[in-house]
Amino acid sequence: MDRIGTKINLTSKLTAVLSGHGKTRAYLYRFNLREDAKCVCDKDDQTMDHLLFHCTKIGTQRDLIKLHLSKQKNWPANKVELITKHRKVFSEFIESIDFDLLQKSDK
């Protein structure tokens, strides 16, 4: 488990996720930059919480982080717990997401 004060590399992806200004379809839709907010997995609106906990398109990445965290504890119930208790793993997970691919209309 990461200790408080552990430094992480604040990349543009991680900053976008933490600030809520990420390249999700729901965020872009709010500013009329997309016609809809629906995720490419066609399950729900593409919010950051949807990507972190439900999206089938990034299930492989989520399974890898779950496997890593299962050695320490259960999968966190919410984003805040995931970020605060598992910063390094969370950062690696975010960096593994191809947000540009998740913007494509092809399902």
Image (cartoon, rainbow, N blue to C red):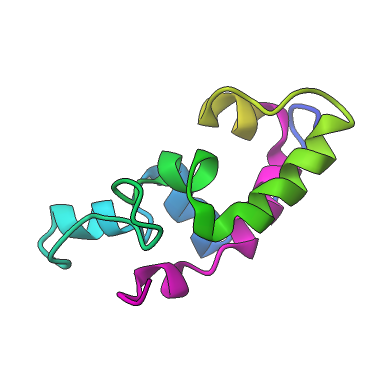
Residue 13 percent location from the top left of the image: 51, 60
* Quadrant (top left, top right, bottom left, bottom right) of the N terminus: top right
Front-lying residue, 5 or 87: 87
Q: Is residue 95 left or right of residue 89?
A: left
Image quarter of residue 67: top right
The one nearer the camera, 63 or 90, is 63
* Residue occupying the point 64% across, 25% down: 76
- Eyeballing the image, is 52 above or below 58? above
Q: Please tell me which residue is depicted at 46% across the width and 67% down the height of the picture.
A: 99
Q: Nearer the viewer, residue 28 or 67?
A: 67
**Place of residue 75 in the rendered image (x, y in percent of width and height, measured from the top left):** 69, 28
Q: Is residue 98 visible?
A: yes
Magenta stretch holds residue 72? no
Q: Is residue 54 left or right of residue 31?
A: right
- The relative height of residue 50 versus residue 78 in the rendered view (above or below) is below
Q: Main secondary structure of the magenta part?
A: helix
Q: Which residue does the image show at 32% across and 46% down from the upper left?
A: 44
Highlighted range, magenta = 85-107
Q: Residue at x 67, y 56 (%)?
A: 61
